[in-house]
Image: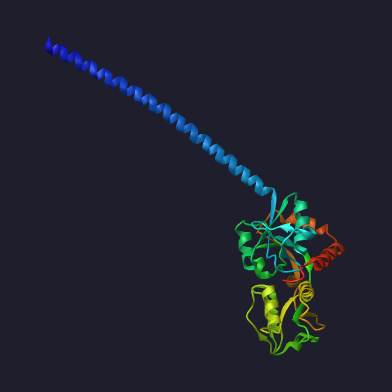
Amino acid sequence: MKKRMCILLAMCLSMTMFFTACGKNGENTKTDDRLNETEVQGEKDKGDTQTGTDQKSKDVFRVGMEAGYPPFNWTQLDNSNDAVKIEGNAEYAGGYDVEIAKKLAEGLGKELVIVKTDWDGLVPALNSGKIDAILAGMSPTAERKEVIDFSDSYYKSNLVMVVKKGGAFENAASIQGFKGAKITAQLNTFHYTVIQQIEGVKKQTAMENFPAMRVALEAGIIDGYVSERPEGISASAANKNLVMVEFTDGFVTSDEDTAIAVGLIKGSDLTAKINEILAGISEEERTQIMDNAIINQPSAD
């Protein structure tokens, strides 16, 4: 009898453990189902957020420029003359490049965003996807064409020399009149490569930007710097101590050197449309845009 009671107790204990285990398994299954639903919803939300980001990027035209090369592009403190807000700070960008960028953005049906970028950082920014295009007074040289594509030209300009007013080189009629002069140009531009065409020139280290060269020129550190005509006009207008020298016998250049075009990533699907928009801007209108840029440029660096 005692033995039978023990057997019954053992059987009851086993059944209790069995049902308890079943209950736990059922609870785990239900919990796992809730977790799976949460994970699925999370992935859906993540996808919706990503789609929103992608859509936003499709609605803007991000243009990189120095915003420090007047009259092509410059930085100012307000939105006068329809300047465009620079991304990430309280400043605005104006100039010829900005006005052309506006027309491109309008033609593309996108909102224009100006991304202020150092000259040496423009191509890397383009190739990394941080910007969609470069409008920065950039020439489509053979070297640059190896790493990025270019649109058709949207401006063409001759080279000049900017010197100190009243100095020894103000009346030079030829580039050879700068023999013995300390001459420089902006770093990583074709302007710097043409200096060697001057016999006996004292070629100085290239400088990072035009404001730096203007300061060096006024301080007597250099005797002149190579530039393009619009910047030369800008420099002399902004500083009464500087003057632009044009030549009857000037630098030998190619069309690709003196032309200015929009920089685009290799194989960009924007190239054809941008060329179409540029073709609709007449030479007369381009000249007027540049004239206005020269008038509206900041009066001082």
- Give the total number of marks visible in the rendering: 0
On screen, residue 73 above or below 37: below
Q: Would you identify the image quadrant in which residue 30 lies?
A: top left
Q: Would you identify the image quadrant in which residue 189 lies?
A: bottom right
Residue 156 image point, x, y percent: 79, 69
The foreground one among 86 and 280 is 86
Residue 240 image point, x, y percent: 78, 78
Q: How is the image coloured?
A: rainbow
Residue 279 image point, x, y percent: 81, 59
The foreground one among 282 and 17 is 17
Q: Which residue corresponds to the image point at 78% horizontal and 76% vertical from the top-left? A: 236
Q: Which residue corresponds to the image point at 75% horizontal and 60% vertical from the top-left? A: 98
Q: Is residue 76 left or right of residue 48?
A: right
Q: Is residue 103 left or right of residue 147?
A: right
Q: Most extreme residue toward the left, as rendered? A: 2
Q: Would you identify the image quadrant in which residue 67 lies?
A: bottom right
The foreground one among 252 and 67 is 67
Residue 222 image point, x, y percent: 68, 83
Q: Which part of the image, by quadrant, shows the N terminus?
A: top left
